[in-house]
Amino acid sequence: MGNRPSGYVLIMLLFVVTAMGIGLLVAVPVWQTQIQREREQELIFRGKQYVEAVRVFQIKKPGTFPKTLEDLVEEKCLRRPFRDPMNPDGDWNIILLPEGGPGGAIRRGPDGNPIQTGGGTRRGRGQGQGFAVQSILVAPKSALSSIRNAQILGVVSSSTKKSFRTYNDEESYDRWLFFYGQDPKQPPEIVYYGQSSK
């Protein structure tokens, strides 16, 4: 008779531990999903910061693009460098004008009409609002020193993980593009570093 209460306590304790374990099994995925969604929001915010920084760089130095992400901080176009929130290393892939287009993105012909070189055209005047890009080069940050006349337009995550939300009709982070001259309704031709363009 004396052992019966301790037996009940043991059964109750096992029940509580089991219930807590089940609760944790349910809570952990929800918590991980919430963290991932917050990172997605941060990715969009940071990516847009780089787009705005390149736009400001264009205003300060018309006709030129930054050669490194550090140029944006040095020219006070970006308050501080941001890390890729989807990549543990924090390194972005860089979006550039395709090679072979030095300064060509904003040139005009003798008749004053825009001429298309280097993957971009300017349609109209005034602080880059008419700048549009038809093709881009995506390269890892580590490859920048190997690219002749690098002209940075923006950034994209190096993570190939599938996203929870859709951004500009894309469902993996390495396709969430953030670059100056982007038209969400007209996706650019993407050339990856080391791959030849069509």
Image (tube, grey):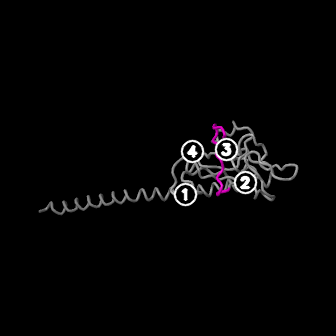
Where does residue 90 sit, x and y in percent of width and height?
A: 59, 47
According to the image, label 3 marks what residue? 137
**Residue positioned most to the left:** 1
For image coordinates 69% across by 36% down, the residue present is 146
In front of the other: 156 or 124 = 124
According to the image, label 4 marks what residue? 89
Q: Earlier in the sequence, mark 2 or mark 3?
A: 2
Highlighted magenta segment, given as a residue range: 183-198
Q: Name the residue type under label 2.
A: Ala
Whole-angstrom CA distance, mark 4 to mark 3, is 21 Å
**Residue positioned most to the right:** 110
For image coordinates 69% across by 45% down, the residue present is 96
Label 1 element class: strand
Characterize the local packing of mark 3: few (<14), some (14-19) or many (20 or more) Cα atoms within 10 angstroms.
many
According to the image, label 1 marks what residue? 166
Indicate the quadrant where residue 49 lies: bottom right
Quick one: quadrant of the C terminus?
top right
Q: Earlier in the sequence, mark 2 or mark 1?
A: 2
For image coordinates 26% across by 60% down, the residue present is 15
Secondary structure mostly seen in the magenta stretch:
loop
Where does residue 174 sit, x and y in percent of width and height?
A: 58, 48
Q: Earlier in the sequence, mark 4 or mark 3?
A: 4
Whole-angstrom CA distance, mark 2 to mark 4, is 31 Å
Q: Name the residue type under label 3.
A: Leu
Q: Name the residue type under label 1.
A: Thr
According to the image, label 2 marks what residue? 132
Q: Earlier in the sequence, mark 1 or mark 3?
A: 3
Q: Earlier in the sequence, mark 2 or mark 4?
A: 4
